[in-house]
Amino acid sequence: MSADHVPTLDQMREFFAREFSQNPVLIDEVTTDHVVVRMEVDHQHLRPGQTVMGPVMMALADTAAYTALLARGISYAPAVTSSLHITFLARPKADQDLLAIGHLLKLGKKLAVIDVRVQPADRAELVAHATVTYSIP
């Protein structure tokens, strides 16, 4: 892939399988406008009270943000998270997959800012909202 190459969904999935095989997040949709990533929730993602752990939702949000940046061009692959602010809005149920929808808000020379909304896969009720900033080398 060239530096300006905007990856297809299949190319993005291949990239994540190769570079982040330890990341269980699935990529459902990629456009230059937004991305949708999915976490198949199971017992390892739960805390007492049968709800999804905060760090799991943070990882999901960060993956959505990184995917949204890569959707603008694979040349952004060396970028790293410089900040992640998340607000937990509701307790997600243990028996539902979670989606994170990422929108690139600003792409500058050194920083990218991405808005991420986390919700159950079967409805549009937000369980978390994150603003993620990536440092671009």
Image (cartoon, rainbow, N blue to C red):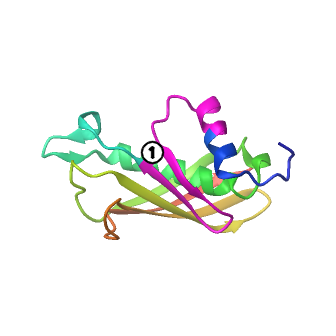
Residue at figure coordinates x 27%, y 33% from the top left: 44
| Residue of label 1 | 59
Q: Residue 41 location, x and y as percent?
A: 31, 43
Q: Is residue 17 magenta?
A: yes
> In the figure, is residue 79 to the left or right of 120?
right
In percent of width and height, residue 102 lies at: 54, 62
What type is the residue that disc 1 sits on? Answer: Ala
Which of the 4 image quadrants contains residue 117?
bottom left
**Residue 60 visible in the shown view:** yes
x, y (%) of residue 89?
29, 65
Would you say 4 lies left or right of 131 here?
Answer: right
Give the percent coordinates (x, y) of residue 77. Answer: 72, 43
Q: 129 or 31, which lies in front? A: 31
Q: Give the range drawn in magenta.
A: 14-38
Splitting the image into 4 quarters, where does residue 69 fall? Answer: bottom right
Q: Is residue 137 visible?
A: no
10 Å crowding of disc 1: few (<14), some (14-19), many (20+) = some
